[in-house]
Image (spheres, rainbow, N blue to C red):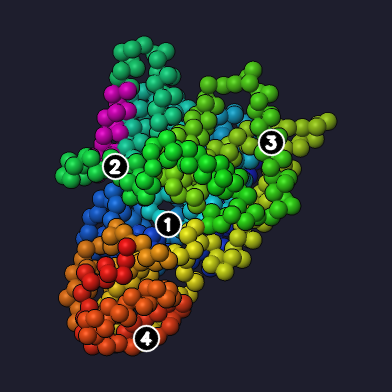
């Protein structure tokens, strides 16, 4: 067997390891089914029924590509939660392959390609979580973004067809999830710099081909803007959906930079889970931090042999940092927006370690193996959390893994098929019951009773609940909210019964329907 074939087999084994790692944790039921994932599933179901959504329900900064892929899975395998996750596993397997291929183009040897694949196969908790459950576009963003970097380093982009292909993928990425811009912007700048040596006429032709491809790829995004206006679309792209700060831009940027340091850096390095701040695998973490410092020193010493292509991963890191600090997305402490940084970290480690030797012995592979062990132990510790590997940083948004099935069983047993609840209950309830139970998210889940109308994402559900002759209310156990709802029911002359189910209070058997508009009295 030639060395070339042997390395291909080893890379194939790393990809299989990546799939097996995810399948193992799925088998362990380590990922609670959340509302964002349920929205993707509902969109996929509606697509099979003839719906054609452009964006994730209720927002316009994440396209419906993930839902269309899941719909294809549903058409073949049925509408199940595991099918949603299967699509994410396949997307991530593709990302592992492309990351290895990118490492090959960056560093020129199989050792780095294999190291990158192994680090991606058993990655940090943050990477494992957000590439296994669907939040609407993270898997696609990583796959498309990696493809943009890989193509930017190839020879094909010096031909119009190759440049157009790069543009199409960049455009699709813009529509699928704006996070892809952290790859597209540095890759695009790199291409402009690279094309410059070809002469201005050739450069202009290639740039026009790339721009034309981008327009075609992002056509759903452009079409939406033409129909609904550009201002709102651009605001959504920069995070208006999560803009909750009321301070000046300088104070806001400083706060986001602090968040990046306190929350983003530890989750990127695998030192904490995305939903908490506790240190994972403390003893191993010391060695991991030492490995990161060693890699940084190796790259520092490599300054004299720096290649222009190595600016690409650094550009992605800088783009993520700029986007996090300068836009409203910097309020999110979970770490999900730092997934591209983790991927670039793995590439940096892959370029630094595999060829490191001491007296002829390959020390680098020991370091890579140690980091894989650290990530594996950290993931196992994170999965032992009572809420398992949750996507929720805010405690008020977390549900027990079996909460929604218990609520569904109770509601169906008592004939309650319509009503009002919180965002984190409404959409999992609809998906898991094949939309037999339709509950609109008009109630708050925050302890201070904060509520945003954006939680109510699908107007057809509003119409169904408004037309119902009987409704129920489902809220998390919260004395202040419960007291307000009881007073509201008495004010409207409604009698009811109550039950506590899975840490939620269910107001049921109402003798008259309660209009959803009056529930605003219990929100702020």
Name the dominant secondary structure of the magenta segment. Answer: helix
Q: Secondary structure at mark 3?
A: helix
Q: In front: mark 4 or mark 3?
A: 4
The residue range painted magenta reads 207-222
Residue shown at 33%/50% (left/top)? 241
Q: CA distance from mark 2 to mark 4?
A: 42 Å
Q: Are marks 3 and 2 in contact (CB under 8 Å)?
A: no
The residue lying at 60 percent from left, 21 percent from top is 306
Dots 2 and 1: beta carbons under 8 Å?
A: no
Cα–Cα gap, marks 4 and 1? 34 Å
Residue ID at (21%, 63%): 459
Circle number at residue 374: none
Q: Residue furthest top?
A: 199
Query: Which residue is under mark 3?
Result: 293
Tell whether label 4 touches label 2 (CB within 8 Å).
no
Q: Is residue 306 left or right of residue 408?
A: right
Name the residue carrying label 4.
498
> Can you identify the residue that label 1 sits on?
134
Q: Spatial distance from mark 2 to mark 1, Cα to Cα?
A: 23 Å
Whether residue 185 is situated above or below residue 38 in the rendered picture: above
Of badges 2 and 1, the one in the foreground is 2
* Secondary structure at numbered mark 4: strand
- Looking at the image, do the residues carrying marks 4 and 1 touch, with CB atoms under 8 Å apart? no
Q: Is residue 141 visible?
A: no
Dot 2 corresponds to which residue? 235
Q: Is residue 45 magenta?
A: no
Q: Secondary structure at mark 2?
A: helix
């Amino acid at each position: 067997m030639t060395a070339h074939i042997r390395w291909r087999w080893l890379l194939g084994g790393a990809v299989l390891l990546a799939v097996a790692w995810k399948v193992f944790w799925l088998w362990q039921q380590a990922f609670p089914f959340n509302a964002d994932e349920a929205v993707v599933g509902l969109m996929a179901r509606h697509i099979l029924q003839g719906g054609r959504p452009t964006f994730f329900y209720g927002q316009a900064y994440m396209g419906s590509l993930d839902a269309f892929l899941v719909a294809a899975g549903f058409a073949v395998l049925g509408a199940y939660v595991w099918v949603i996750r299967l699509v994410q596993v396949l997307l991530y397997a593709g990302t592992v392959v492309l990351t290895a291929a990118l490492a090959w183009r960056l560093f020129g040897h199989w050792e780095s390609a294999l190291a990158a694949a192994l680090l991606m196969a058993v990655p940090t908790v943050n990477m494992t979580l957000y590439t296994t459950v669907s939040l609407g576009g993270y898997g696609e963003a990583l796959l498309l973004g990696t493809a943009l970097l890989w193509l930017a380093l190839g020879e094909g982009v010096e031909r119009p067809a190759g440049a157009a292909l790069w543009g199409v993928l960049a455009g699709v990425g813009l529509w699928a999830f704006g996070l892809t811009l952290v790859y597209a912007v540095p890759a695009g700048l790199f291409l402009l710099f690279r094309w410059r040596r070809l002469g201005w006429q050739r450069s202009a032709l290639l740039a026009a081909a790339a721009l034309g491809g981008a327009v075609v790829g992002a056509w759903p995004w452009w079409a939406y803007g033409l129909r609904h206006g550009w201002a709102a679309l651009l605001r959504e792209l920069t995070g208006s959906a999560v803009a909750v700060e009321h301070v000046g831009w300088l104070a806001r940027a400083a706060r986001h930079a602090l968040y990046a340091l306190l929350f983003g850096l530890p989750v990127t390095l695998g030192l904490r889970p995305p939903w908490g701040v506790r240190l994972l695998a403390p003893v191993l973490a010391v060695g991991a931090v030492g490995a990161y410092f060693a890699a940084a020193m190796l790259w520092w010493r490599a300054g004299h042999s720096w290649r222009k292509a190595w600016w690409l991963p650094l550009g992605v890191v800088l783009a993520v940092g700029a986007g996090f600090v300068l836009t409203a997305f910097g309020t999110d402490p979970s770490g999900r927006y730092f997934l591209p940084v983790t991927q670039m970290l793995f590439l940096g480690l892959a370029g630094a370690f595999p060829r490191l030797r001491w007296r002829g012995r390959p020390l680098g592979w020991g370091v890579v193996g140690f980091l894989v062990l650290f990530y594996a132990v950290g993931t196992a510790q994170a999965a032992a959390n009572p809420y398992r590997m949750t996507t929720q940083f805010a405690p008020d948004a977390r549900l027990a893994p079996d909460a929604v099935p218990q609520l569904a069983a109770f509601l169906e047993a008592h004939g309650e098929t319509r009503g009002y609840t919180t965002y984190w209950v409404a959409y999992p309830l609809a998906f898991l019951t094949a939309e037999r139970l339709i509950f609109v998210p008009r109630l708050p889940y925050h302890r201070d009773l904060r509520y945003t109308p954006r939680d109510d994402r699908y107007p057809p559900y509003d119409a169904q609940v408004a037309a119902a002759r009987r409704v129920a209310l489902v809220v998390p156990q919260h004395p202040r909210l419960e007291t307000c709802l009881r007073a509201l029911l008495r004010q409207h002359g409604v009698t009811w019964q109550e039950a506590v189910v899975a840490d939620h209070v269910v107001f049921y058997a109402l003798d008259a329907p309660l209009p959803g508009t009056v529930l605003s009295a219990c929100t702020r």
